[in-house]
Amino acid sequence: MATANPTDKSTFHKVSDSMAEKVANLTRTFQAMERSSKESSAPKEIPKSELIKTVAKGKGIGYVALKNIKIGTLILDEKPQIFTEGIPPESKFFKALSESFKKLQLDDQEKYLKLYNRFEKTGLLKEISNIQTSGGGWTTSRGVIGEENPFMMDKDQKSPFWKIYGIFKTNSLTDMEMKRDRSCQTAKGRACSRRDLGLEVSRFNHSCSANALIAWKEETQSYQIRTVSKIEAGEEICINYLCGKSMFMKNTRTRQRRLLVDWGFECKCSLCLSETANPISSHDQYERYATLEAHAKSLTDANTAEEVLYFQKGKPIDVDKYLENTYGRVLCYKEMYKIAQEKKPVRTHLMDFMATGMVAIGGAGARAEDEKVESWANIFMDEGALFLNVISKLYKIIHGCTTEEWIRIQPKFLWEKNEEDQNRRLLSSGYYRTDDCDSASE
């Protein structure tokens, strides 16, 4: 058999050119397949005007469905129109807010000024009385272009800017703890935050058991709202303002307190009314969920400690205990899912803890196979199929993708979740610290 001479440059170039051509062909084929898949399987989005309309409700302007809407339907895709940087009372915050408002078309300015403003009665000065106005990041009273800083020069709140700021503070999506990067740095290296507002997104009312989900789409730099349950014609479409992870599966009292403080209203959604009418059973459900969550964490910590001792000191892992702990976690997650599903919470967090369970199942299943423990391997295989089925359904609803698209995305999704889980567990155990990682990468 003929072999290539490593010293023959012409042979080397032939091999290289041949390999490059193969790679190029494979790339073109993959791109064509991806385009074909998207064109044939991606659902056609229906214009917003055909799906929903604005109506005046008792709690303000809201959106209702014009027709029956399927689960996973894209209701709205909107790029923010108002942007700010920093936090009040920093001058650049007011400058950015003022400039953004002035750039809006007159119709959009009118639409903005009709948005809910929770400070119309309470007043903004009360809310910011604890903010330092000197030595706290700004040293001048010049805030908005051509105007004095409203906090310093207009304490009677006669300037129209107060209304612009009040509406922004009420509807800014930063307060909803969206999953996106809003961080920035000042010229002096201090951390600051970017906030923004979408005119249409801001018109959706709140429900603790919302039938739609708001999410940030990094690729399009826009907010998307999708249905997470079937919606009947005439039904109001609501999102959950408490979409941050810290508010996931919190009881009525906690939710009401947060909504009152941050948005200035008392929620009267179906979930709040039901739980208020049945306080004891509702309380027991949330207590049970919290107990299961804590137990799952203790089992996770026990397994992580075993892994750390193995990596640090070579101590063998107690396989039986490790597999029992993992199965205990699986049972916790299954019961947690059952409780949470009844509450119709934010689906992204529901999917996250099920994905954490899936990662645990995958690791335990692989360990059971390595140790030739067939009974445990079969158990984790069955549980893995159940968890993967739930995750796939939730992912397709949240992202509006097809089964074919999910199959293509699935390996990367699970790999990323595995990396996140491992890093989180090792960080919490103290096995390594973030500063160690940073210094190692420098």
Image (cartoon, helix red, strand yellow):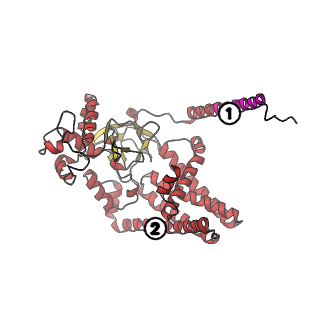
Residue at 53 percent of width and 55 percent of height: 355
Q: Secondary structure at mark 1?
A: helix
Quadrant in which the N terminus appears: top right
Task: Tell me, yes or no, whether the two marked residues, 2 and 1, touch with CB atoms within 8 Å.
Answer: no
Give the percent coordinates (x, y) of residue 111.
26, 35
Inspect the image, locate mark 2, and give the three-letter code of the amino acid beneath it: Ala
Give the residue at mark 1.
Answer: 23
Q: Secondary structure at mark 2?
A: helix
Give the percent coordinates (x, y) of residue 311.
60, 64
Magenta-colored span: 1-27
Residue at 50 percent of width and 58 percent of height: 424
The chief SS type of the magenta part is: helix
Q: Quadrant of residue 32?
A: top right
Dot 2 crowding, Cα within 10 Å, few <14, some 14–19, many 20+:
few
Give the residue at mark 2.
Answer: 294
Inspect the image, locate mark 1, and give the three-letter code of the amino acid beneath it: Val
Dot 2 or dot 1: first in sequence order is 1
